[in-house]
Image: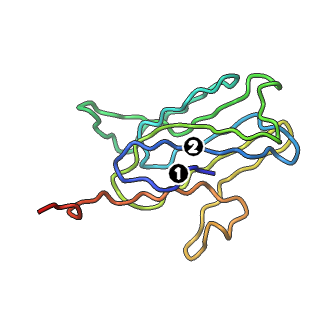
Amino acid sequence: MLEYQVAPAGASYKATFKVGHGCGGSPTRQIAVDIPAGMRGARPMPKPGWTLDVQREKLAQPTTSHGRSITDDVVRVTWTAKTAEDMLPNAHYDEFVLVATTPAQAGTLYWSVRQACAEGRNDWVDVPAAGQKLSDLKSPAAALEILPTGGGAAHNH
């Protein structure tokens, strides 16, 4: 579901969620994306015909960015079609986009994505247990691999 599934640590990342079908034959009326812990400063791209809801929560551990203290951050972004005509038909494709800063640590992050349709829903929220692969899951969350920054590997002598 994520267009780009790898990103460097501590960098700006454009998360593009691809929606290629509705629920059965029913059109998509809402996409809700949970921002993984460690991702910072999520900013969604508005879509014509869709309202945006950005949910923020207090951080357990405040951080500092550009000299100011950050005590809360975005935890969920929801796009909702304004009218039935604005819904994404089952036969069409669209993308829902946000940008955020990746964590400084390497590892895999999982983005839970909930797709609500005029009738029914698809929740892409399953995270693999130890020893499981994403392909083993019925409704896998979108996975993003955070790569370590280059460090000392790029010395030119």
**Residue sitting at 60 percent across and 73 percent down?**
132
Q: Which residue is mark 1?
A: 4
Residue 70 position by quadrant: top left
The C terminus sits in image quarter = bottom left
Callout 2–callout 1 Cβ contact below 8 Å: yes
Residue at position x 57%, y 43% in the image: 16
Q: Residue furthest front?
A: 157
Mark 2 belongs to which amino acid?
Answer: Thr
Identify which residue is drawn at 78% across, 46% down.
21
For label 1, the crowd category at 10 Å Cα-Cα, with few meaning under 14, some 14 to 19 and many 20 or more, is some
- Residue 41 screen position, x and y as percent: 42, 36
Identify the mark nearer the N-term, 2 or 1.
1
Left or right placement of residue 146 versus residue 124 in this view: left
The image shows residue 139 at horizontal and vertical percentages of 71, 58
Q: Which residue is mark 2?
A: 16
125 over 79 or under it: above or below: below
The percent coordinates of residue 108 (x first, y second) are 47, 60
Rendered location of residue 13, percent (x, y): 44, 44
Q: CA distance from mark 2 to mark 1?
A: 7 Å
Q: Nearer the viewer, residue 149 or 142?
A: 149
Viewer-proximal residue among 34 and 12: 12
Mark 2, Cα crowd under 10 Å, few <14 / some 14-19 / many 20+, is some
